Amino acid sequence: MPLTPILKAYHYFWYFQNSFQKTKYQALQKHRDKMNSSQKNRFGRSWVIVKKNYEALSKQIIENVGGINNIISLYHCVTRLRFKLKEDSKANKAALEKIEGVLSVVEGNGQYQVVIGNAVSDVYETIMGMYPIKGEQESTGAALEAPTGNVLTRLFNTMSSIFNPIIIALAGAGMIKALLVVFTTYGLLDNTTSTFKILSAAGNSVFYFLPLFLAISAAKAFGVNPYISLAIVAALIEPNFMGLIENTGDVVSFLGIPVVLMKYTGTVIPAILSIYVYSKLERQLKKFIPKSIELFALSLVSLLIMVPLTVLVIGPIGVTLGNGLGDLINFVSQKSGLLAGLIIGAGWTYLVIMGIHWGVVPIMVNNLANYGYDVIRPMIAAATFASAGVALGVFLRSKRKENKAFALSSMLPALLGGITEPIVYGLSIKYRKPLIAQTIAGGIAGAFMAAMKTKAIVYVFPALTTLPAFFGDTFGYYCIGIFMAFSISAALTYILGFDEEGEAVETEDLMLSMSACINGEMIPLEQVNDPVFSSKGMGDGVAFIPSEGILYAPADAVVEMIFPTLHAIGLKTSGGAELLMHIGINTVDLKGEGFTTTLKQGDSVKRGQVLIEFDLKNIIEKGYDPTTVLCVTNMDQVNKIEPIIQKNITKNDTVLNVVMEGA
């Protein structure tokens, strides 16, 4: 019997006025997408995020770092959002770590780091588009903020903020240089052709003009004008200045003052030192230069002071420091390479965990600039491939389907892109013993490669796709080393094992199991002859064809609402699940005829307790479909829902498992 327009309006009025209509169809669709992700494990932890969910994820992150007013600045590296907060105590670390898409939270290094994984740049862009937050690389007042942490912490933090923006360009250009080495070595490309020279220009550009990249990045990190900074450093590689240099160390004069000439192309430290000094100068100049002439006077005075000062003092000091640092590393590598490789291979993962590993990048880039190779990167590769080995070991040893899926999905980015955070936080730290395995394997492989003086010829992330970057007379040792790291780590992870039982108990404790609210036949919700329910617009759940006229409580709960016509009732469990039970289709037309209950709003009920008695025969005789629905309506707060479809059921059978968000 079809509903009249008035009765239909009345029917939906009650649905959308009561407290159970919080869930919209769009929220349910979002939940479906989340649940269908093959990378999602039982706790909702995933390093792969459906792009349409970035706004929801971004909102949760901002709320749990203390809100927009608690954020000073934000930038990101390859896998992490790096917040600078006013008060770390206002952030909710426990809540952040339970958000789907967040791998872990790291506090330290003067930052509040939220580890995302491969999707970090998309999440960052979403946050910056949604909120008026200063990016640390955009803020002109970043350097005026009160320093946090000790001197070493601030140094690592500064180096990280300077190098992170240019890493992507360094890595791409480095791969071009590495491939050209391979092509020319095997006769695939002649180094005298124009093709080679054009490709060589693409590969050399970032390294040759590295001081210019560093000038812009350092200016943003120190909070000064990036274009004046660029002009200061550009003077060091300007053709007229370069024309003065016949040999490094030649001496010329500036206003009668001796100038020791240095080549600054490809250098690291001079540009950073120069812009650091300029950051101090600019603030003083702004105190004295009138605003009316600042447009030209600031840059005029800055260039007149900083270019000679850099050429006379800062540049030579920077070059000397860079050379000294490189000589020290080579000395250590020559004299005790085995020990150095053991320490770096075993310890690199812990630098990643603390979030300060990017502070080592300047040392590697400086080595490449000074010597044309770097010995640190192969040792780090040992740690990277040891992490990938953990994923294989977990995949082979785990008995849980979701852990196997996560291990396999996180192993691929590690092997192909050198991204290990999903493994470190999702497996190694979580189960502890795999962390021991990768530490041992990384140390052994790192020591081997250091002893063999293995080299990288360009800066890249260590991965299978970047093998050409290690091409040369030590390439064979590199291949042996990464294979050792991967295989030893996988074997040790498998042998040492890990405890999944505690995880199982915790999951069971967090899961709410619901019994059937009807004795009869169970059917999927999609088969209900009412689009309001079958589309899951009201929520997700199950449905029943009753064999008797009694509605039972599916779980211990409190009565939140009883419809005046008694054909539907709403409950709320102590775990926060909001349940709607609806007897029959369009039975609102009966206006309560044949329905009875002794309950009222606010009553507590126990699982299996009678909620409503109804005249099943009367419903059928009057032409109504008696199908009864049990659904969870607040799906935006549900982490996971599992209908357990069976044929014939009773009130004692479990038909639905629900895990709430934050559980």
Image (tube, grey):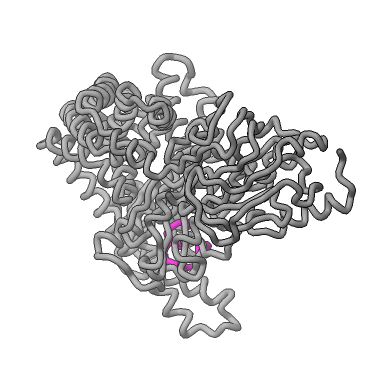
Expressed as whole percent of the image width and height from the top left, the position of residue 384 reads: 31, 33
Relative height, residue 23 to residue 505 (above, below): below
Residue at left offset 48%, top offset 80%: 286
Magenta residues, as a range?
216-227
Q: Nearer the viewer, residue 272 or 420?
A: 420
Q: Residue at x 51, y 30 (%)?
A: 38
User: 595 above or below 524?
Assistant: below
Tell me, yes or no, if residue 625 can be seen here: yes
Q: Residue furthest top?
A: 187
Q: List x then y, in percent, for residue 580.
A: 62, 48
Quarter of image, res 327: top left
Q: Position of residue 476 (x, y in %)?
A: 27, 19
| Lateral position of residue 317 relative to residue 181, left or right | left
Q: Could you say which is closer to the camera, residue 346 or residue 426?
A: 426
Residue drawn at (40%, 50%), measured in percent from left and top? 97
Is residue 206 visible in the rendered structure shown here? no
- Give x and y (percent) for residue 606: 48, 49
- Main SS of the magenta segment? helix
Q: Nearer the viewer, residue 58 or 441?
A: 58
Does the magenta segment cover residue 27? Answer: no
Occupied quadrant, residue 532: top right
